[in-house]
Amino acid sequence: MSRQGPVVVLSYPYSGAERVQGALAAGTDLACTSGTGIIPLCTAAAETWLRVEARNGRAMSRLALVTVRNLVTAQVTAILAAASSTRWCELSTAPASAIEPFLQVFPSAQFLCVHRSCVDVIRAGVRANPWGVQGQGVMPYLLSHPGNNVAALAAHWAGSAEQLLAFEDANGEITHRVRYEDVEADATEALAAIRISLELEASPRDDVLFDPPGQDEPETTPAQPELQVPVEMIPEPLRERIARLHARLGYPPPRPRAPSGS
């Protein structure tokens, strides 16, 4: 099977996926983009065609597929021309359920599913929003956990991780799982097999660069110690759900701090 179709880095907010994308693309001909709207455009266009043609199911007609493909291909061609590259790599935090129409348009697409531990995602989310978490799809969870940003971010992570794992289960031949922590520890080793599977050209350097933290996650300094996440603020049923997901991903379960004085 050819691996020369587009590569989609699929994840959720605060996962560090942008840095993983950069490490994957280092020394290759990938044109990296983020949030272009092309994946949501495929979903919206497919839904419109289904209504126009009064079709049941999710499969687009040949006319709809050709029309959407021509529109999107023109946009991707413009991206590749601007980057002087030959292969497109998009970072998307769209729900995995929105990927099906994109796959109909690009059946040769491959997906890098980036995971990160729930506690680290909470830590990154709180640090990026010191005056209160908002946006990024977290609002429904904030309404379910009013005044508790830790629980809201934990619930958002759980829902996102479940969707991403379900997408991997349903599309095993075109998905590649990687953990942010593994890439941070050794990007070359963590991405070596994935680069081969995606038929990416080897980096001209002996090592794959892993950029320092971006604006969404400021680097920890001696004056800014690591933020301790109060896991005890996560309701127990949600903690148990997270523990099950952590087990699937090879992370330890989140543990509340011992009460003071114990």
Image (tube, helix red, strand yellow):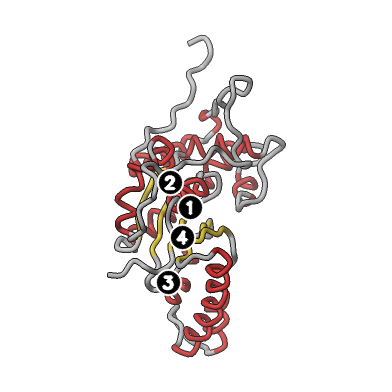
* Location of residue 113 with respect to 257 vertically, above or below: below
The residue tagged 3 is: 103
Nearest to N terminus: mark 4 or mark 1: 1
* Location of residue 131 with respect to 174 vertically, above or below: above
Amino acid under disc 2: His
**Residue 229: quarter of image:** top right
Nearest to N terminus: mark 4 or mark 2: 4
Q: Disc 2, disc 1: CB below 8 Å? A: yes
Q: Which of marks 3 and 4 is in front?
A: 4
Q: Nearer the viewer, residue 82 or 235?
A: 82
The residue tagged 1 is: 11
Mark 3–mark 4 Cα distance, whole angstroms, equals 19 Å
Nearest to N terminus: mark 3 or mark 4: 4
How far across and how far down the image is residue 89, in percent?
A: 48, 61
Q: How many marks?
A: 4
Residue displayed at 45% across by 47% down: 23
Q: Residue 30 carries which label?
A: 4
Q: Nearer the viewer, residue 145 or 22?
A: 22
Amino acid under disc 4: Leu
Amino acid under disc 3: Leu
Q: Disc 4, disc 2: CB below 8 Å? A: no
Nearest to N terminus: mark 3 or mark 2: 3
Q: Nearer the viewer, residue 62 or 8?
A: 8
Q: Which of marks 4 and 1 is in front?
A: 4
Secondary structure of the residue carrying tag 2 is: strand
Q: In which quadrant is the N terminus drawn?
A: bottom left
Q: Disc 3, disc 2: CB below 8 Å? A: no
Q: Residue 115 carries which label?
A: 2
How far across and how far down the image is residue 188, in percent?
A: 36, 43
Image-based side of 96 in relation to 38, left or right = left
Nearest to N terminus: mark 2 or mark 1: 1
Secondary structure of the residue carrying tag 4 is: strand
